[in-house]
Amino acid sequence: MNVSALLEDVDKVFEKYSAPGSAGCAVGVMKDGELIYKAGYGLANVEHNISNTPSTVYNIGSEAKQFTGMAILLLAAEGKLAIDDAVREHLPESPAFGERITVRHLAYHTSGVRCSFPPLLMLGGWLEEDLTTNDDVFRLFLAQQELNFVPGEEFSYANMGYIILARIVERVAGQPLATFCWERIFEPLGMKDTVIQDNPWLIIPNRAQSYWLDDDGKAFNAPLADGVCGPTNVYTSIEDLALWDENFYSGKVGGADLIEQMQQPGRLNDGTELDYAFGVMVGHRHRGLKLVEHGGGHGGYVSALVRFPDMHLSVAVLCNLFNWRARHDALQVADIILDALGYRESGVPKTTAGEADRSGIEVEEGQLAVWAGLYLDAKRVALREFKFNDGKVQLGDLDLRPLSANRFVLEESPDVQVVFKAASDQRPAQVQIISSTTDYSYQRVEPADPTPAALAGYEGQYHCPELNVYWNLMLNGGRLIVRRQRYRDTELTAVFADGFRDDWSAVVNFPRSYFILFDRGADGAIIGFRVSDDRMRNLRFFRQSLDG
């Protein structure tokens, strides 16, 4: 394969970082154990006009989880722990919850533990620029009073699980995770520029600074002031990641059996196989090829490492300008290499959407429009909005292709089916969203538009014992707002009766919202509310009595 002939095509993928003064990224292509292509684009430091290179060091966000997973498996191989050990065997101070949570549950994101980092930190009043350590986040875990779900019943991605795993490594190995990983993983593999930042004041040579763009395209610093390790805060380079990637073939660290174990998908209590393994995702395919991958984002950094084990081919993209395209760009580069290698699979599109090939049918618009509306999964506190737009049913902004008048697939992910059920005298309309690993049901709820007088009924002070914070709800210009001690006010937007959306985008400078569901007593009076997002459910706030 003539790599030099591919340079122009790869450069086109990253030309968006070519503007003067733009931060950017680095890319590496690994084939058969060799780093066959590496390059940097844009600036590692905008203020000092320092370019990104394959040796530049980036925070890889959640890609860090695979190193924590490896650390746990190394200790397990030595008999110092077992992955089916209860967490309280190693951390007896952990909450009991009335359930047995194991190391395995934490690694596969099936523990039910609420995600403290960042959701509970934010709700507890931490600002992005606050110094945050593992001890801070672990204390939030110790204060948790409920689980999201029974361990093993569901998958819910949670950074908290890997923070607890980091604490277990420290307790069992008798040394910090950063030291253990350096001695047992990074140094043996020659990853000389890789470090776990468990101290936010640590000096990391050749580190790229991170940036984000506002809506007008103006760049700002995206500083990180946390030393939270386990789920994030590994700093590494393209050149070092190539050494780590090859370990999945050589087994130099851990051996072949451990590498295989690391890539075994988890299972739920009912036997459902997950897409997630021990810190890596293993359930996706691209152009018919098995894909092992993980991405990450932290501050202004984003990353993706995609591996095609059947081709002994991997692509890594590390960026210091926040965007949502790192995985997309990595797969674009992979396509360039796969095409150059002459790889073809008849009938399989260049997509990671899934293997299913289901043809749609024509359905009258009147039969489609009836499904538009809001649907709630009360158990998971998850809301889905279906719209009818331009002759199509949409889930959010994703088009659905009809297989019948009530059965659809996602255009971009045809392995995901959406099945509607009409309303009856006993129940409202329902929708079922089915993928290879999940099957969730939602019930239609009617949208609400309460008057200012009705909103006034929600006013009051509310206390969360778990976080020990107070929120004050009050009317301001006919709007229901939330006033907190350290954050600017946010507005609650009614979604349905007693259900509100709390948008924090203006608070944290990135898309973030919480769902608030008010609770009423037997007399109909509001007694409190529960706050939820996709990684945390039913955090309880109680209304304080008016007489103090």
Image (cartoon, grey):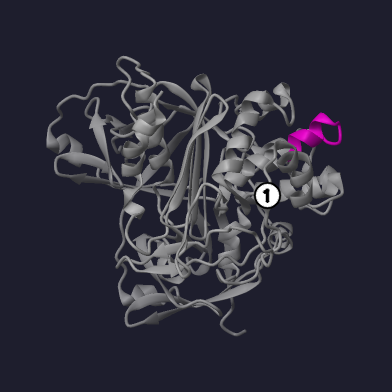
87 lies left or right of 43: right
Residue 207 image offset from top left, x and y in percent: 58, 58
334 lies left or right of 534: left
Nearer-the-camera pick, 205 or 288: 205
Nearer-the-camera pick, 317 or 117: 317
Queried whether the magenta region covers residue 340, the answer comes back as no
248 lies left or right of 432: right
Residue at the spot x=65%, y=49% of the render?
193
Q: Quadrant of residue 478?
A: bottom left
User: What main secondary structure does the magenta stretch of the protein show?
Assistant: helix
Residue 37 image offset from top left, x and y in percent: 47, 36
Residue at the spot x=52%, y=62% of the render?
209
Q: Quarter of the image containing the N terminus?
A: top left
The image shows a total of numbered marks equal to 1
Q: Amino acid at mark 1?
A: Gly
Residue 218 image offset from top left, x and y in percent: 34, 69
Q: Which region shows up in magenta?
A: 71-81
192 lies left or right of 45: right
Q: Is residue 384 above or below residue 420?
A: below
Residue at the spot x=26%, y=30% of the render?
406
Residue 352 visible in the shown view: no
Residue at the spot x=24%, y=21% of the render?
359
Q: Residue under circle 1?
A: 230
Q: Quadrant of residue 545?
A: bottom right
Q: Is residue 517 above or below residue 237?
A: below
Nearer-the-camera pick, 309 or 141: 309
Residue 129 visible in the shown view: yes
What kind of element bears circle 1? Answer: loop
Q: Quarter of the image containing the C terminus?
A: bottom right
Q: Is residue 421 above or below residue 379?
A: above
